[in-house]
Image: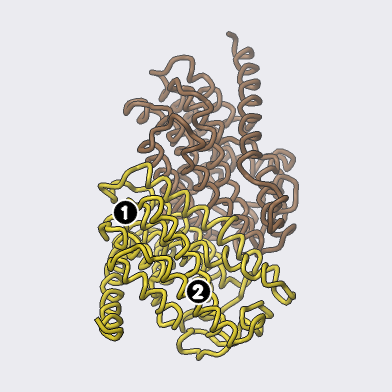
Chain colours: A yellow, B brown
Amino acid sequence: MTIMERESHLTAYLRDRKALIDEALDRLLPGAENEPQVIFKAIRYSLFAGGKRIRPILCVAAAEAVGGAVDLVIPVACALECIHTYSLIHDDLPAMDNDDFRRGRPTSHKVFGENMAILAGDALLTEAFSILSDSDRQPGVDPSRLLLVIRDVARAAGIWGMIGGQVMDVQSEGKAVGMDVLYDMHARKTGAMIRVSVTAGALLAGAGDRQMAALADYGTRVGLAFQIADDILNVSGNSRLMGKNTGSDVYRGKVTFPAHMGIEGSRKKLGELVDQAIDDLAAFDDKADPLRLLAKFIMEREL
Amino acid sequence: MTIMERESHLTAYLRDRKALIDEALDRLLPGAENEPQVIFKAIRYSLFAGGKRIRPILCVAAAEAVGGAVDLVIPVACALECIHTYSLIHDDLPAMDNDDFRRGRPTSHKVFGENMAILAGDALLTEAFSILSDSDRQPGVDPSRLLLVIRDVARAAGIWGMIGGQVMDVQSEGKAVGMDVLYDMHARKTGAMIRVSVTAGALLAGAGDRQMAALADYGTRVGLAFQIADDILNVSGNSRLMGKNTGSDVYRGKVTFPAHMGIEGSRKKLGELVDQAIDDLAAFDDKADPLRLLAKFIMEREL
């Protein structure tokens, strides 16, 4: 296949997997025919706001890379998206980033009020674990492996991962922080959930120890690449792609990779990370091609 | 044993089990030697604020009632307390109940700021599932039973349980609501977590179907009794016992049982529920005595 053929193949792959995930999310998260209506509405408002489903697609692609079935990991993939969505709702709150818009639409607290936005976030985090632990929905899954996945996801989302990183982010606003702190902050804030998306899919699909180690490395690098690409786009990009005002991180005094190493330095680092991530997959056959192309897509921020 | 002997026996039982739970929480929730310090501090500030550990003690007592070992359910018991504590932190937020004091101390957002209080609540909810799913800490536990427990806890804490009830509570402020809505609201807001505390302990300890059904009934009635006792104390009680200003629910226009059936009517209903809860345990031997006396303690709000 030529590169263009492979990319068109990936576009079809992404469209198909995204459709599977959207359909499963629609099935797993109940609608506003339930009471109290407002919480069901608020959950779905944010969950179906045009997210690209990067984390669930990475989860599915990792399962496929080790020869697993897509169906097997769909609930876990959906739970990852619920956790991601909860984190966006709470990050946007007035007491946090105080953002009025996300993906071109008013944020949850602007539509439903601050109390309902807090509760919608809490609900999505809780429902994620409800979906994860419902082994009836996951026939053929080994209960011990599923427990490991739940533990890994909880750790990635918690104080050692995403929440710890968010606290560091809040604390670093307007302060000069070193490169080591910047790396650690992003490894926790965005990296941990992206990495666990990859490893959870592979683990549930029956990956062996060596495959798991390679995929963990891949996930770590893709997670960092994703953040650097986000920072670059925030400084130089256009607001259509971001769905919010560009330059807002700088305005807020947030520390970024371009601030530390310049735009060109950041682009170089990004390219290296993507090359290394693809190298991590050297021992995998062509079933890992979606993971390889996903790394490139993330670099170009087409995802 | 005389009633007084039994009650003194229960006092010793409660003290001992509470000490076990406090010690386990101290071990399971890391301290401020970790970074970023503030989140670890905020978690422990609320977790060790003088809570009576009612939910974890019910969990342990239910396990013992069916002949299970205490050690086996300590992690689950601790996770229930983490979820309870997160719900208090978020309920106290300015956008919710806007409470400055809880158990006689400034609330989390007054000490750590609103952003950290939101994150501390998120963290406690997440760590609860991290503790629940860590089967290494729970040797001898059947993975399939543990998955059922995680699912039950998540459902009790989520949109069908506690969060749904909290949304109903927010929506009902200052409005006239009927008895059926009042029951439904409390069954979800406080009842679901109290009930699952009982059933999770019993399930993990290997309870059979008939024992589970009886204990679920017991848990439902104790949960409702707890809320009615809380309402009565809020209207008539003293602020020392409550750790907050009494009458605050009325001031806020919250709907209560005394408002619907009067203080005497509420006391009568409370007594009936406790009698029925004790009847639910008729088929159990004296290993269920702590559960029997816990029902009475809850009525007298000594817990």
Determine the chain carrying the residue at label 1.
Answer: A
Image quarter of residue A258: bottom right
Where residue B109 appears, x then y in whole percent? 69, 59
Q: What's the mark number on residue B30?
A: none
Determine the chain carrying the residue at label 2.
Answer: A
Where residue B103 appears, x then y in whole percent? 71, 45
In front here: A272 or B249? A272
Above or below, B261 relative to A149: above
Instruction: Count residues near mark 2 (Cα–Cα under 10 Å), then give few for <14, some for 14-19, many for 20+.
Output: many
Callout 1 amino acid = Ala
Callout 2 amino acid = Leu
- Whether residue B91 appears in this view of the structure is no
- Whether residue B260 appears in this view of the structure is yes
**Residue shown at 66%/40% (left/top)?**
B236
Mark 1 lies on residue: A205
Instruction: Count residues near mark 1 (Cα–Cα under 10 Å), then give few for <14, some for 14-19, many for 20+.
Output: many
Of the numbered discs 2 and 1, the one sitting upstream in the chain is 1
